[in-house]
């Protein structure tokens, strides 16, 4: 509805000290998403007026605020009007610039939630926009096509196999009594990786399979069951490829 969300009400009640801590937290969230903590991306410099680009701190704070606000609940769109409810009116032009940039570049308001329908405008056939050809119906290709449709473009997806999904494929073993995922079952990092957003939108629980970085001691869940499960998956993947799934040879 139009009533302020719980997050907006909380932000409005913050003291100056609490607001500063909130700004620092939002900066760390933006950093985890691949944005520099105290600088502009080259593409951002191009959209700002010279004065704002020369002293970008206010824009960076607004940009970080928008990123953090949407990541708080990516299941629903974050319209610019909702952002304006928590930002001083003197920064309206920065909200417009940051929100437009983040939306166009797919950093906010994307995904597979029912709140983000993949549909082109009703007048697309009468007044067609630019057409885009997407090569490959894997996860990246399908996600790109969906987002382009939301932008009002006409999209055609070409796929060489007889099925969509790319490397995301379930191999059935033992006459369908068992299954193993040959791809798409592991998300490396959940912050900068948009698959983390999709998992939240779909309500898919995530399981931390191992801890630490490469070369460090791996996580140990329940006496080594994590490592045993990994061996089972690797064995199943090998059998699935040898069983003629078509993935190893690149055939459908």
Image: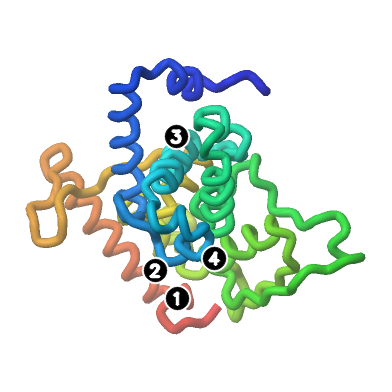
Q: Secondary structure at mark 4?
A: loop
Kindly check if marks 2 and 4 are in contact, taking CB atoms under 8 A apart as contact: no
Q: Position of residue 45 (x, y in %)?
A: 45, 62
Q: Image point 32% across, 70% down: which residue?
A: 238
Q: Is residue 248 visible?
A: yes
Which residue is tagged 2?
240
Q: In the picture provided, is 244 more to the left or to the right than 39?
A: right
Residue placed most toward the observer, 98 or 160: 98
Q: Work out whether mark 1 precedes mark 4 in sequence or the reverse, and give the earlier one.
A: 4
Q: Work out whether mark 2 precedes mark 4 in sequence or the reverse, and give the earlier one.
A: 4
Kindly check if marks 1 and 2 are in contact, taking CB atoms under 8 A apart as contact: yes
Q: Work out whether mark 3 precedes mark 1 in sequence or the reverse, and give the earlier one.
A: 3
Which residue is tagged 4?
165
Residue placed most toward the observer, 211 or 97: 97
Which residue is tagged 3?
72
Distance CA(mark 3)–CA(mark 1): 37 Å
Visual colour scheme: rainbow
Quadrant in which the N terminus is drawn: top right
Q: Quadrant of residue 13?
A: top left
Q: Residues within 10 Å of mark 1 (few under 14, many from 20)?
A: some
Which residue is tagged 1?
247
Q: Image point 9% across, 61% down: which residue?
A: 215
């Amino acid at each position: 509805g139009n009533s302020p969300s719980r997050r907006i009400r909380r932000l409005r009640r913050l003291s100056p000290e609490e607001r500063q801590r909130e700004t620092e937290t939002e900066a760390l969230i933006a950093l985890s998403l691949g944005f520099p903590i105290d600088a502009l991306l080259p593409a951002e410099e191009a959209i700002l007026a010279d004065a704002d680009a020369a002293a970008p701190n206010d824009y960076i704070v607004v940009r970080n605020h928008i990123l953090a606000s949407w990541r708080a609940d990516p299941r629903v769109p974050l319209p610019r009007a909702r952002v304006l409810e928590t930002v001083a009116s003197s920064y309206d032009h920065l909200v417009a610039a940051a929100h437009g940039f983040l939306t166009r570049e797919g950093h906010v308001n994307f995904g597979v939630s029912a709140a983000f329908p993949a549909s082109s405008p009703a007048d697309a056939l009468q007044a067609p926009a630019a057409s885009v050809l997407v090569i490959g119906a894997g996860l990246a290709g399908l996600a790109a096509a969906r987002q382009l449709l939301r932008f009002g473009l006409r999209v055609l997806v070409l796929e060489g196999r007889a099925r969509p999904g790319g490397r995301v494929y379930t191999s059935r073993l033992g006459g369908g009594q068992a299954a193993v995922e040959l791809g798409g079952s592991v998300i490396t990092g959940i912050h900068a990786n948009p698959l983390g957003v999709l998992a939240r939108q779909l309500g898919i629980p995530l399981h931390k399979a191992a801890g630490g970085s490469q070369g460090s001691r791996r996580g140990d869940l329940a006496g080594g069951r994590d490592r045993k499960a990994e061996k089972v998956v690797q064995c199943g993947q090998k059998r699935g490829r040898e069983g003629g799934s078509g993935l190893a040879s690149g055939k459908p």
